[in-house]
Amino acid sequence: MKLISILLRGRSLWIFLLLFTGCDEEIELPSNLSIQIENNNDGSGVVNVHATAKNAAFFRIYFGEEPNTPIETTDGNATHTYGSSGSFQIVVMAYNSENKFVSTHQTVEVVVPLQIPQEGYTTPLSYAGMTLAWNDEFEGTSLKSSNWSHEIGTGSNGWGNNELQYYTSENTTVNGGYLIITAREESVGSNNYTSSRLITKDKKSFRYGRVDIRAMLPKGQGIWPALWMLGKNIGSVGWPKCGEIDIMEMIGGSGREKTVHGTLHWDNNGSYASYGGSYSLQSGIFADKFHVFSIVWTSTTITWYMDDIQYHVIDISPAELSEFQNEFFFIFNVAVGGNWPQSPNNSTVFPQVMVVDYIRVFTP
């Protein structure tokens, strides 16, 4: 027992001395860290990273796509498959020990074809007693200038809602029979987000009839897609005297992406007025598949439908709602931030897209 005790004490002393000596030695940080990124942009979303560093025991590589869990590797090689297009920051950390590391980063642009689900509700090309007066099925590879114009920039006070995006034409694409409006996290001037806002002003305007818009919506805190209308006379009378018909609005964020809103805005003898209703899905959210957002507009009422389910109606026959006896034009946009949805946060994933399959206008 004495021998064992002495040996243990001796071993303990040796361990102590070893550790004590080790604490006095400065651990050399990894150096000469470099990274090579292979991104073929072949539509697969696959990006390869090869990292090297002198005196590195292992690497942690972050690919910048949520949940952004690092890949740990001893040889510096890692592969990630991105699920969406966008600009991503790849961060590489080279470690000598758990607390001794150096890091570098590089931005990669990834292009992944948008996976658009084919399922969802659809509506016909004809209705009894009505005529198809105008439609856009978004065929071809570019937006029809005879139908649409872009509004560019930030508007007045973030388009009057303290929105955070800068609208560009570059965030609009037409592909595969779809109109795609993309909201991105990227800087233009003092704005940290970009998107698109399309209007038919001075090109297509209507009074009375049925409007069907088949669309798949984006999601995420701070995302605000809208399909709506303004009075053709806005240039002469301003808002809200021109009237506003919100066919569909949705505000992104947990628990809110299953609900869409239909609202009327107008001037009530010098005072602003509005009246709206909403519809919520029983399961899923509006980003899962296509739905059809509709209004039926007569001289006496405007009625809102979601997939032909009526959920809101207003009587527009009173004189104070006379705005809605005039012609209106269409606006499609995806806003980021603003008074209603509030700003994006760390849970918001960019880019986000609103995909429109068609707009069809039927008149009596």
Image: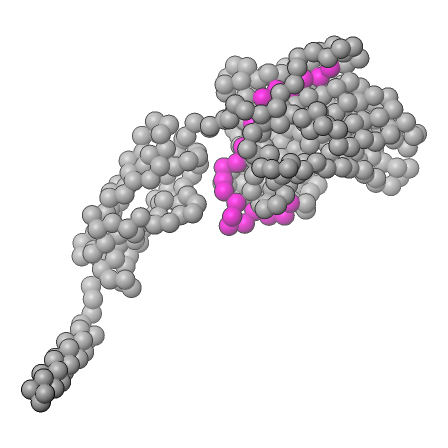
The extreme left residue here reads 3
Tell me where the magenta segment starts and ends, as one range: 341-362
Asked if residue 239 can be seen in this view, the reply is no
- On the image, the x and y values in percent for residue 352 come to 52, 36
Q: Residue at x 39, y 34 (%)?
A: 110
Question: If the image is split into quadrants, where does the N terminus sit?
Answer: bottom left
The picture quadrant where one finds residue 66 is top left
Seen from the viewer's position, the closer of residues 25 and 247 is: 247
Based on the picture, tell me whether residue 361 belongs to the magenta stretch. Answer: yes
The extreme bottom residue here reads 2
Q: Residue at x 75, y 28 (%)?
A: 310
Question: If the image is split into quadrants, where does the C terminus sit?
Answer: top right
User: How many marks overall?
Assistant: 0
The picture quadrant where one finds residue 7 is bottom left
Q: Is residue 233 left or right of residue 124?
A: right
Q: Is residue 48 left or right of residue 134?
A: left
Asked if residue 275 can be seen in this view, the reply is yes
Based on the picture, tell me whether residue 315 belongs to the magenta stretch. Answer: no
Q: Residue at x 46, y 28 (%)?
A: 114
Please name the colour scheme applied to the rendered image: one colour
Seen from the viewer's position, the closer of residues 148 and 274 is: 274
The picture quadrant where one finds residue 356 is top right
The extreme front residue here reads 1
Q: Is residue 120 left or right of residue 239?
A: left
- On the image, the x and y values in percent for residue 4 come to 9, 84
Q: Residue at x 27, y 59 (%)?
A: 101
- On the image, the x and y values in percent for residue 199 come to 66, 25
Seen from the viewer's position, the closer of residues 4 and 73 is: 4
- On the image, the x and y values in percent for residue 90 come to 35, 45
